[in-house]
């Protein structure tokens, strides 16, 4: 009788296991990357709109960059809730589940020269492992808008 070695079966199972792990990690990193890019783009847009909308026209004629801070904050918050569809806790809910939560840790607004900066983290849950691993992933962000005049 000729005995067959089980090494080929073990290596095949090991290969499948490693392939699944690499695929799951790749999908999770891609999800993190796309969420970070989306948040960076939307926050930059929100800050630019808020800064532009809050520019004081009486100073603009004299080529001075100055914003009205309460207006800028109001426009920024309006963009977060109306355009990004965040609730009062800065959470984006889709299909009854929280897709992500925006946590703003630092806000820096300078009236003149006009500048608005926010930083914090975006808290997301893993896509494939959310039922197995009850962790949240914090993705740091930092966005800044400023009004500059070149003349």
Image: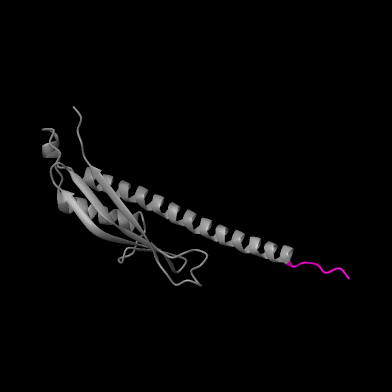
Magenta part of the chain: 1-6
Say which of 58 and 41 sits in front: 41
User: Residue at left 74%, top 68%?
Assistant: 6
Whether residue 54 is visible:
no
- The answer to whether residue 30 is left or right of residue 81 is right
**Is the image coloured rainbow, by chain, by secondary structure, or in one colour?**
one colour
- The answer to whether residue 19 is left or right of residue 91 is right
Quadrant of the frame with the C terminus: top left
Which corner quadrant of the image does residue 86 belong to? Answer: bottom left
Instruction: Please determine whether, in this image, residue 132 is positioned above or below residue 109.
Output: below
Say which of 86 and 136 sits in front: 136
* Residue 145 in the image, given as x and y percentages of width and height: 25, 44
Residue 4 belongs to magenta span: yes
* Residue 12 in the image, given as x and y percentages of width and height: 69, 62
* Residue 111 in the image, given as x and y percentages of width and height: 13, 46
User: Residue at left 89%, top 71%?
Assistant: 1
User: Residue at left 21%, top 48%?
Assistant: 116
């Amino acid at each position: 009788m000729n005995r067959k070695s089980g090494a080929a079966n073990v290596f095949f199972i090991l290969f499948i296991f490693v392939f699944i792990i690499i695929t799951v990690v790749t999908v999770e990193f891609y999800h993190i990357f796309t969420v970070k890019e989306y948040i960076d783009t939307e926050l930059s847009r929100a800050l630019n709109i808020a800064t532009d909308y809050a520019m004081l026209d009486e100073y603009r004629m004299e080529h001075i960059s100055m914003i009205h801070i309460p207006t800028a904050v109001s426009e920024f918050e309006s963009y977060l809730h109306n355009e990004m569809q965040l609730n009062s806790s800065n959470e984006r809910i889709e299909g009854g589940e929280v897709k992500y939560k925006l946590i703003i840790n630092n806000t820096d607004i300078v009236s003149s020269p006009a500048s608005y900066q926010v930083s914090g983290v975006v808290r997301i849950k893993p896509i494939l492992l959310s039922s197995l691993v009850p962790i949240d992933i914090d993705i740091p962000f930092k966005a800044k808008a400023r009004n500059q005049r070149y003349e």
